[in-house]
Image: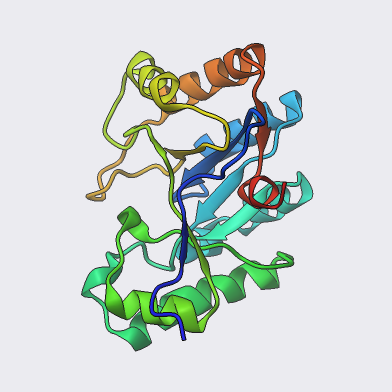
Amino acid sequence: MRVFPKFIYKVITKEKLVALTFDDGPHPEFTVYLLDLFKKKGIRATFFVTGKNIEKHKDIIIRMIKDGHELGNHSYSHKNLIFKKKNKIKEEIEKTDMLLRELGVKGKILFRPPFGRILFAASHVLVALNKKVIMWNVPTKDYKLNDPKVILKRIYKRIKPGSIIVLHDSGIDRVGNKINRQATIIAVKALLDELPKRGYKFMTVSELINN
């Protein structure tokens, strides 16, 4: 039996394919703005959502599914899993999966741990639940940056075929303070124009994995 789940940081490919991923949402302002933008551009992304925010914004989740975006599990409460026992970790993941299923998510649900951190207890649970753990190889640090130029610089420096880019669409930062995501939104708008000029195509994480 495997001790650790499968971690995916990027996909090995020669094709210029990348996945945009967003953590911590959905949010009634920032997520909706992104959805409008993606619909206009014909782009699909992967959103790793929390159970608490699913409960608050079920209509946004339903729209995401309708628009063809991928919904991933980002735990229920967004608490650091390295401090939780196995039964609590299992509850966090299964409760969020259940909420997504109730709203119409089909197929396998990918998982991304809060803050990108897990230890042995969470690893055992994820193996038992047969979860793929989606990390990233393009860290934008937009959770603490408010300058879109800096966010874009970090992306352009690291982007390569098969990259997974991590961004955030919630209305709070890592310590629970309210945050304006305009820097992220401005950066995303620039990305949607610039990366296709460089020959890149946007896909969901599952599409990238299965390509």
Q: Quadrant of residue 109?
A: bottom right
Q: Is residue 29 visible?
A: no
Q: Is residue 171 left or right of residue 32?
A: left
Give the colour scheme of this rendering. Answer: rainbow
- Residue found at x 30% / y 69%: 81
- Residue found at x 32% / y 18%: 150
Q: Position of residue 195 (x, y in %)?
A: 59, 18
- Residue found at x 57% / y 43%: 12
Report the label total.
0
Query: Compared with residue 119, is residue 91 higher up or lower down, i.e. above or below?
Result: below
- Residue found at x 56% / y 58%: 72
Q: Position of residue 130 (x, y in %)?
A: 55, 77
Query: Compared with residue 137, is residue 109 higher up or lower down, i.e. above or below?
Result: below
Q: Is residue 101 left or right of residue 85?
A: right
Q: Is residue 50 left or right of residue 148?
A: right
19, 173: nearer the viewer: 19
Q: Is residue 99 visible?
A: yes
Q: Position of residue 110 (x, y in %)?
A: 56, 62
Q: Position of residue 202 (x, y in %)?
A: 66, 32
